Image (cartoon, rainbow, N blue to C red):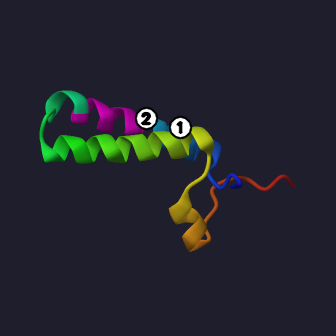
């Protein structure tokens, strides 16, 4: 895997993931919606920490600056 998620994109993903996880674990705990929010938050956390997004790869998008 190579990195295709830029720094700002990673920060936004992690902030959004935190809000989804909060809502899923506290506001909608024990519901299907809460489970869905938790899964979405976990996926965003993973892609934010690792710096790789499979959907970006499939679509040919990269928000990471080139090393040049």
Q: Which residue is mark 2?
A: 15
In which quadrant will I find the C terminus?
bottom right
- Label 2, residues with CA under 10 Å away: few <14, some 14-19, many ≥20: some
- Answer left or right for 2 relative to 23: right
In the rendered image, residue 20 lying in the magenta stretch gets the answer: yes
Task: Indicate the position of residue 6 as horizontal and vertical percent values.
Answer: 64, 48
Q: Is residue 31 above or below residue 4?
A: above
Task: Indicate the position of residue 21 as horizontal and vertical percent values.
Answer: 31, 34
Structural distance between the alpha carbons of marks 2 and 1 = 6 Å
Q: Which residue is mark 1?
A: 11
Q: Nearer the viewer, residue 62 or 24?
A: 24
Q: Disc 2 vs disc 1: Cβ atoms closer than 8 Å?
A: yes
Question: Image quadrant of residue 39?
Answer: top left
- The residue stretch that appears in magenta: 15-24
In which quadrant will I find the N terminus?
bottom right
Q: In percent of the image, x 13 and y 35: which residue is there?
A: 30
For the residue labelled by badge 2, is the local secondary structure a helix, a strand or a loop? helix
- Answer left or right for 47 relative to 15: right
Label total for image: 2
For the residue labelled by badge 1, is the local secondary structure a helix, a strand or a loop? helix
Q: Nearer the viewer, residue 8 or 2?
A: 2
- Answer left or right for 4 relative to 55: right
Q: In percent of the image, x 53 and y 46: which residue is there?
A: 47
Q: Which mark is residue 38?
A: none
């Amino acid at each position: 895997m190579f990195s295709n998620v830029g720094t700002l994109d990673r920060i936004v993903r992690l902030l959004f993931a935190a809000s989804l996880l909060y809502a899923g674990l506290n506001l909608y705990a024990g519901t299907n919606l809460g489970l869905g929010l938790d899964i979405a938050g976990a996926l965003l956390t993973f892609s934010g920490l690792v710096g790789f997004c499979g959907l970006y790869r499939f679509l040919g998008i990269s928000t990471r600056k080139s090393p040049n």
